[in-house]
């Protein structure tokens, strides 16, 4: 198996390239003046890649799914693209549908949905709405850096708290602590569960793997703060990357247990569509000594391919290696008392919001 040609790393970014493999071929995307100046600096290198945000006005905000291996049927994505820049992010291919690169474009050309809270209020007020937990952060992170200025995720949670609607949050950011007041209040009514993703405890690995996500220790500290506030919180070891992070499973579990995490979950790395060539390029840049070994292991657990899209197997993989991972996670969870379950989220407290200025009578 031939490795990709090494590319120079880009400071603060995960993808080493804006190569855009498409469903029908490949395209090298040239620098575009509105996001990467063509003018070189004094050292002959392009200036730092700037993040841009485009306002998006969707007609609806709740996305539905019927996947049998996902524990929720609806979610909200306040943003498209994610500045965290995690090279392994399975959501990267969604940018290709906007004629943008799943590489650098995905982490620098972002879309924000400032009408999200308004749309959510309208959808929850519909007479035929049926309550079930809404998930945030399952595609792109609702607490990525631009949430600090835009506040879209908080506005969404305010509506859910007001209507007593159940909520699931997945994030790799301690920025959600800004909203701990809302989350703690919802937790008292069994309306919220949080998963904090920790991929590695090694800051050097984290800087290249997920360059703009908060330091792993800050995420562990966030677990402690949430637990102390009464918010059920688990650690999500996601993704587990063979020969890169798999040796850290027990250490991450121990650190999360010390922080008070209620339980643990994990996902074996997935490389759908354009993510695979981007990950290969990242390996060639940062781990040329083991790039072939990593991809051989990936293909071993994916039935000889870079990715297995099958339900159930896509999250865990198949074969001996995933079995060993599952055993290690389960053993560590039992040892640290992290094999508990979240309290069931309540759906019976939901109160529809006002419709056209009128409160529901029945």
Image (tube, rainbow, N blue to C red):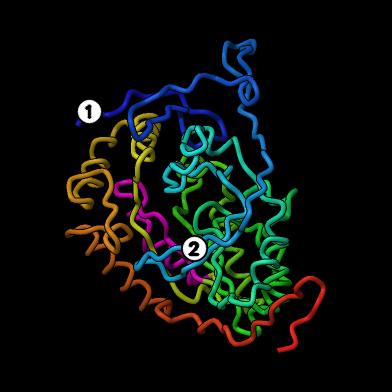
Determine whether label 1 and label 2 are within 8 Å by CB: no
Q: Which residues are magenta?
A: 234-258
Is residue 294 covered in magenta? Answer: no
Question: Tag on residue 2?
Answer: 1
> Does label 1 or label 2 sit earlier along the sequence?
1
Residue occupying image coordinates x 66% and y 84%: 188
Horizontal arrangement in the rendering, residue 28 relative to residue 224 (left or right): left
Instruction: Say what secondary structure mark 1 lies in.
Output: loop
* Residue 83 percent coordinates (x, y): 58, 42
Magenta stretch contains residue 239: yes
User: Residue 133, image x and y in percent?
Assistant: 54, 74
Residue toward you, 264 or 49: 49
Q: Is residue 139 found left or right of 228 in the rendered image?
A: left
Position of the C terminus, as image quadrant, is bottom right
Q: Residues within 10 Å of mark 2 (few under 14, many from 20)?
A: few
Query: Residue 67, percent across and down?
Result: 37, 64
Front tag of 1 and 2: 2
Query: Is 288 placed above or below 181 here?
Result: above
What residue sits right under mark 2 in the picture? 64
């Amino acid at each position: 198996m031939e490795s990709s040609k090494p590319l120079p790393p880009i400071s603060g970014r995960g993808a080493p390239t804006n190569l855009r493999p498409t469903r029908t071929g490949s395209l090298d995307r040239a620098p575009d003046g509105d996001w990467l100046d063509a003018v070189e600096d004094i050292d002959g290198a392009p200036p730092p890649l700037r993040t841009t945000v485009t306002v998006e006005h969707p007609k609806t905000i709740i996305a539905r799914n019927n996947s049998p291996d996902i524990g929720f049927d609806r979610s909200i994505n306040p943003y498209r693209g994610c500045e965290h820049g995690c090279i392994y992010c399975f959501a990267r291919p969604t940018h290709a549908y906007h004629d943008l690169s799943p590489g650098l474009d995905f982490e620098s050309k972002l879309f924000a949905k400032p009408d999200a809270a308004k749309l959510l209020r309208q959808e929850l007020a519909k007479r035929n709405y049926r309550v079930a937990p809404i998930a945030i952060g399952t595609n792109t992170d609702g607490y990525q850096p631009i949430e600090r200025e835009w506040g879209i995720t908080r506005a969404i949670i305010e509506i859910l708290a007001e209507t007593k609607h159940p909520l699931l949050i997945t994030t790799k950011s301690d920025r959600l602590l800004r909203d701990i007041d809302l989350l703690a209040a919802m937790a008292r009514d069994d309306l919220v569960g949080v998963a904090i993703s920790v991929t590695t405890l090694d800051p050097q690995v984290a800087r290249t793997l997920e360059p703009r996500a908060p330091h792993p220790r800050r995420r562990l500290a966030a677990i402690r703060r949430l637990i102390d506030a009464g918010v059920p919180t688990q650690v999500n070891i996601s993704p587990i990357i063979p020969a890169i992070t798999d040796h850290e499973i027990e250490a991450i579990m121990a650190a999360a247990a010390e922080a008070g995490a209620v339980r643990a979950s994990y996902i074996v790395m997935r490389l759908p569509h354009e993510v695979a060539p981007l990950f290969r390029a990242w390996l060639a840049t940062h781990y040329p000594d083991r790039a072939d070994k990593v991809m051989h292991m990936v293909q071993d657990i994916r039935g000889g391919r870079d990715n297995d899209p099958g339900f159930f197997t896509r999250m865990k993989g198949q074969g001996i290696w995933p079995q060993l991972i599952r055993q290690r996670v389960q053993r560590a969870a039992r040892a640290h008392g992290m094999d508990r379950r979240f309290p069931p989220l309540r759906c019976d407290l939901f109160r529809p919001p006002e419709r056209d200025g009128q409160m529901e009578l029945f």
